[in-house]
Image (cartoon, rainbow, N blue to C red):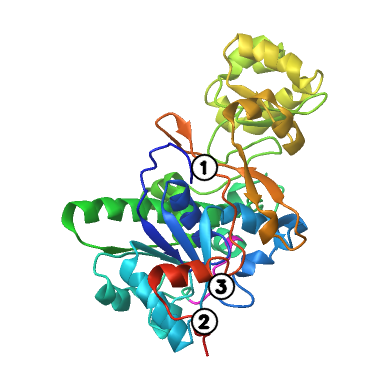
Amino acid sequence: MPDDIDRPLEGILVLDFSQFLAGPVAAMRLADLGARVIKIERPGSGDIGRTLAFAGSVADEETVSFHAMNRNKEGMTADLKNPADLERVKDLVRHADVIVQNFRPGVMERIGLDYETVKEINPGLIYASASGFGNTGPWKDRPGQDLLAQSMSGLPWLNGSREHGPVPVGLSIADHLTSCHIAQGVTALLVRRARTGRGGLVETSLLESMLDLQFELLSVHLNDPSITVRRGGEQSAHAFLAAPYGTYPTADGHIALAMNPLPKLAELLEIDELRAYTEEDAWSKRSAAEELLATRLATAPTEHWLRVLDAADVWCAPVLTLEELVAHDGFSAIDMVQSIDRDAALTRDGQSMSLKTTRSPIRVDGRPLVSATPSPKLGQHDAELREEFGWSDEASA
């Protein structure tokens, strides 16, 4: 990464054995922070994420989502069932600082790359392991997929109104949060290693990430089982917050209202029926209050209501569509977009490729972490790594 940012993980070597999303994004987060990441894939097909396209979007015959979540990495192929390839990988382990893997429980043990085995090769190694539902218990062998983890965590019952069935979050929230926890655990163990010299094992799962996301709800329910999910009406955005917390239609879109006293809103929006509502009424008459707000807010455009409410320091915001978001000056100001570029010599059609994606959300010393380094082609750095580590050029059997 040819820039002058002092990236905190410069000099750290990460071996990324993971697939799909949680593991690869965790390794990408480490790469954005300066680590050298070598992505190790099976020959021929590689990470299934190369072909599992988000929204069917493809660039250079690989998915845009793969390009986005594997930026800043080198690419190596290895058949882990082949003794010669496995020996090369173990040689990399001797040099590595971190391993990231998200195979189902038992897979790395069968290969001989589980933590107990590799720490004998490299005692200072940090080993990060992500699973769907942990390594023990009745769910450990279930497929570790985002929607399934959301569903088993109960999260979909927090979304939508009481008239709806379960409403999952429409993004891979379990995978993304798991990637953050893996990266956090790795960096914490790197700090401990610097202090003590010890390596270590960090583990998490999609399910644990979903349970952690609900720590407020679970903490309250575990101490008072009478507290349970009772979703509100059509406008409500939270089963455990009183009116007006929710989203409301306007004449040309939607507006979100957060925690605000109803009498104040009654004055600003000129809703006579709402003036007498007390703090208790905001709970006991939540649906009625929301209906009164929805009826009034639907009479004028979003911008009109924002002018009225912003002037009175009411907590509110427009509910933007995807198109409105990316066209807004606020989106440009936060500067979350970067380009990743693949040289023409590495593309299938011989034309250079440039893709826009998001950058790391972290800024270091006031600087955003960006890089134009694209995801690797399958096995792109095999020859360079053979030369660097002195491996034989003989083809694997």
Which mark sits nearer the N-terminus, 3 or 1? 3
Residue at the spot x=52%, y=23% of the render?
279
Label 3 with label 1: CB-CB less than 8 Å:
no
Which element is circle 2 on? loop
Secondary structure at numbered mark 1: loop
Q: Amino acid under label 3?
A: Pro
Q: Amino acid at mark 2?
A: Asp
The main secondary structure of the magenta stretch is: loop
In this rendering, the label closer to the viewer, 3 or 1: 1
Check disc 1 and give the amino acid type. Answer: Ser
| Distance from Cα at disc 2 to Cα at disc 1 | 31 Å
Q: What residue did someone put label 1 on?
A: 360
Residue closest to the eye, 332 or 130:
332
- Residue nearer the viewer, 306 or 161: 306
Between disc 2 and disc 1, whose residue precedes?
2
Q: Is residue 143 highlighted in magenta?
A: yes
Determine the CA span between mark 3 and mark 1: 28 Å
Rendering quarter of residue 57: bottom right
Q: Is residue 210 visible?
A: no
Mark 3 or 2 closer to N-term? 2
Q: Is residue 261 above or below residue 231?
A: above
User: Which residue was labeled with disc 2?
Assistant: 79
Identify the magenta region.
141-146
Identify the residue at image location x=51%, y=49%.
228
* Farthest left residue in view: 196
- Give the residue pinned by disc 3: 143
Residue positioned 51% across, 77% down in the render: 78
- Say what secondary structure mark 3 lies in: loop
Q: Position of residue 107 (x, y in %)?
A: 45, 80
Residue 330: within the magenta?
A: no
Q: Quadrant of residue 234?
A: top right
